[in-house]
């Protein structure tokens, strides 16, 4: 098969037309998709990890002066009367109960009964192609579609099939399907990208 100058020009034009599409396809594969279990399982209250900005209610039974509402500060601590600062960030509510019980048991009280419950979760953030991007209060059991609804819905340019989420404490965002099975957690940053066409 022999290429004429016309045929060669046609081949070069076709390659030039395909090259941008190949570059776009390669760019789309940069963000890793999430592990399947991460998008479909909700975290129970017992598994929830506390973080800066969470507000908790601490109840020490029969000790109203030690009980109260506490907000986890920027250093990840809460300050409790009698025992001082206790690390709360990175702990589950049950682990925090155990840590406070251990501190109260070491010379302050005999057999303390402690309960920790989350009153207010830290916010989540949604950016990109939604009507009102910003910071929003988290509600227990929130999924992606309810988070998008809180932010005013998708814009007409939004990719409403896939979103990107950076979970609290992670340095990388992962792609997730834009469905009700994708859960949003406190501290998450949800990015809704623009669709290509």
Image (tube, rainbow, N blue to C red):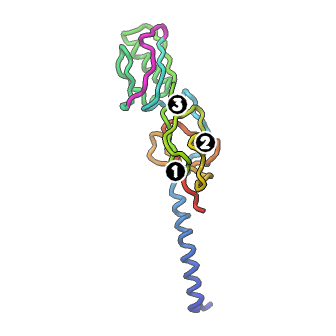
Q: Give the range drawn in magenta.
A: 61-73
Viewer can see residue 174? no
Look at the numbered discs 3 and 2 and tell me whether their residues touch, using CB distance below 8 Å. Answer: no
Q: Earlier in the sequence, mark 3 or mark 2?
A: 3
- Dot 1: few (<14), some (14–19), or many (≥20) neighbours within 10 Å? some
Q: Is residue 86 left or right of residue 161?
A: left
Say if 99 sits above or below 191 in the image. above
Magenta segment, prevailing SS (helix, strand or loop)? loop
Q: How crowded is mark 3: few (under 14 residues within 10 Å), some or many (20 or more)?
A: some
Q: Nearer the viewer, residue 112 or 173?
A: 173
Residue 112 lies, in percent from the top left, at 46, 11
Instruction: Pick the quarter of the image with the C terminus.
Output: bottom right
Classify residue 123 as left or right of residue 6. left
Compared with 79, 125 (above or below) is below
Q: What residue would you read off at disc 2?
A: 149
Residue that label 1 marks: 128
Query: Callout 3: helix, strand or loop?
Result: loop
Q: Which residue is drawn at 58% across and 44% down?
A: 152
């Amino acid at each position: 098969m022999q290429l004429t100058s016309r045929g060669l020009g046609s081949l070069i034009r076709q390659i030039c037309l395909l090259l941008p599409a190949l570059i776009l396809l390669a760019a789309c594969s940069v963000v890793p998709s999430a592990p399947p279990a991460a998008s479909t399982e909700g975290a129970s209250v017992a598994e929830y990890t506390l973080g800066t900005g969470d507000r908790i209610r601490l109840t020490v039974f029969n000790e109203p002066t030690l009980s109260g509402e506490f907000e986890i500060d920027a250093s990840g601590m809460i300050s409790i009367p009698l025992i001082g600062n206790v690390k709360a960030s990175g702990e589950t509510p049950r682990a925090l109960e155990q840590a406070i019980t251990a501190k109260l048991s070491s010379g302050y009280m005999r057999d303390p009964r402690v309960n920790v419950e989350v009153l207010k979760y830290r916010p989540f953030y949604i950016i990109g192609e939604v009507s009102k991007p910003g910071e929003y209060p988290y509600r227990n059991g929130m999924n992606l579609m309810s988070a998008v609804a809180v932010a005013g819905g998708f814009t007409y340019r939004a990719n409403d099939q896939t979103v990107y989420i950076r979970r609290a404490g992670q340095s990388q965002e992962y792609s997730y399907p834009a469905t009700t099975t994708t859960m949003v957690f406190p501290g998450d940053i949800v990015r809704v990208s623009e669709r290509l066409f």
